[in-house]
Image (spheres, rainbow, N blue to C red):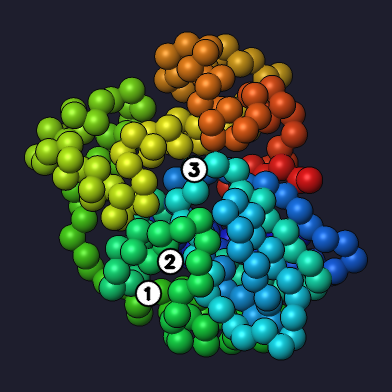
């Protein structure tokens, strides 16, 4: 159903995590939940009507619908995705800061909501061209050429440093991060909201959550919640339970027993 391809360009790998192609035959609707992620997703749609709700988005096959560019915001709760009809859809999955390097506006100004259409003629043309190409490698090659040429050398290295500090230690305080980045906590949070799409504290929670999922996926042993809890910097079992319920609306046991890992990055989804 979904094929995920890593960028071939070493330069783009810092900004784009992967390209995804979703194909469905329309024999049945596809419904699944996705969960908070550290990056962001952009979908190039053709012949698709889109219906948006607070935590739900529907893609409906419609030959009369205009081509669109749909951008996901930094959602902090589960989001339900529903496909109705036949699709051959192309998505770009950006790294945490990656999307900021291809637009004139920071991410939060582009995507203040969970979902939104962005007006961008060049990306619409890219989506239409890709939809007419059958070979996946050629789709990806065309997308890579576009993003390579669209790159903007913006100066947000200080946020890259902050993100690295969080990834290295999820228990690091926001005050410590701000000090090491030579700014106030207020400025740090303002920059995080602008370029990451959420506060630094929320990003810490998402990172810890995603690390716990990766830990479970990579383990060959049966689920051991005590190991997942302490090896991923949760303070204790109640902290682990509380954050999982907040980000997934499920307790850890139900969550891990109900998800399916999709693509080479093992992106977790829960089919409905």
Instruction: Give how far across and how far down residue 78 sits, in percent.
Output: 60, 43
Q: Nearer the viewer, residue 220 or 227?
A: 227
Q: Nearer the viewer, residue 8 or 243?
A: 243
Whether residues under marks 1 and 3 lie with C-beta atoms below 8 angstroms apart, the answer is no
Q: Which element is circle 2 on?
A: loop
Return the disc, 1 or 2, that comes first in the chain's sequence: 2
- Residue 57's place in the image compared with 165, above or below, is below
Reading the image, the residue beneath label 2 is 9
Q: Nearer the viewer, mark 1 or mark 2?
A: 1
Task: Determine which of the numbered discs, if any, sits on residue 108 in the image.
Answer: none
Alpha-carbon span between mark 2 and mark 3: 31 Å
Reading the image, the residue beneath label 1 is 148
Instruction: Give how far across and how far down residue 229 sits, in percent.
Output: 52, 17
Residue at image x 64%, y 15%? 224
Instruction: Give how far across and how far down residue 137 sits, in percent.
Output: 61, 73
Horizontally, residue 79 falls left or right of residue 243, namely right
Q: Nearer the viewer, residue 229 or 168?
A: 229
Asked if residue 195 shows in the view, the reply is yes
Q: Give neighbour class at mark 2: few <14, some 14-19, many 20+ (Cα, 10 Å).
A: few
Reading the image, the residue beneath label 3 is 76
Whether residues under marks 2 and 3 lie with C-beta atoms below 8 angstroms apart, the answer is no
Whether residues under marks 1 and 2 lie with C-beta atoms below 8 angstroms apart, the answer is yes
Horizontally, residue 234 falls left or right of residue 100, namely right
Q: Quadrant of residue 85?
A: bottom right
Q: Nearer the viewer, mark 1 or mark 3?
A: 3
Q: Nearer the viewer, mark 2 or mark 3?
A: 3
Return the disc, 2 or 3, that comes first in the chain's sequence: 2
Image quadrant where one finds the C terminus? top right
Q: Give neighbour class at mark 1: few <14, some 14-19, many 20+ (Cα, 10 Å).
A: few
């Amino acid at each position: 159903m979904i094929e995920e391809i890593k960028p071939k360009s070493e330069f783009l790998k810092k900004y784009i995590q992967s390209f995804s192609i979703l194909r469905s035959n329309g024999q049945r609707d596809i419904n699944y939940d996705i969960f908070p992620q550290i990056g962001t997703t952009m979908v190039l749609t053709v012949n698709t009507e889109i219906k948006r709700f607070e935590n739900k988005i529907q893609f409906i096959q419609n030959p009369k619908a205009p081509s669109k560019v749909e951008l996901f915001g930094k959602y902090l709760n589960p989001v339900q995705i529903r496909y109705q009809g036949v699709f051959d859809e192309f998505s770009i999955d950006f790294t945490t800061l990656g999307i900021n390097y291809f637009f004139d506006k920071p991410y939060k100004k582009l995507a203040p909501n969970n979902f939104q259409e962005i007006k961008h003629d060049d990306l619409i043309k890219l989506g239409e061209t890709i939809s007419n190409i059958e070979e996946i490698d050629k789709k990806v090659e065309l997308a890579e050429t576009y993003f390579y040429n669209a790159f903007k050398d913006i100066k947000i290295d200080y946020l890259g440093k902050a993100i690295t500090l969080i990834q290295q230690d999820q228990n690091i305080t926001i005050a410590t991060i701000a000090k090491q980045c030579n700014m106030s906590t207020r400025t740090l949070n303002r920059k995080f909201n602008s370029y990451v799409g959420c506060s630094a504290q929320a990003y810490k929670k998402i990172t810890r959550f995603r690390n716990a999922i990766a830990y479970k996926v990579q383990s060959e042993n049966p689920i051991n919640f005590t190991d997942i809890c302490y090896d991923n910097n949760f303070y204790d079992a109640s902290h682990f339970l509380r954050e999982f319920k907040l980000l997934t609306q499920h307790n850890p046991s139900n969550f891990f027993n109900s998800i399916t890992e999709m693509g080479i990055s093992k992106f977790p989804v829960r089919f409905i």
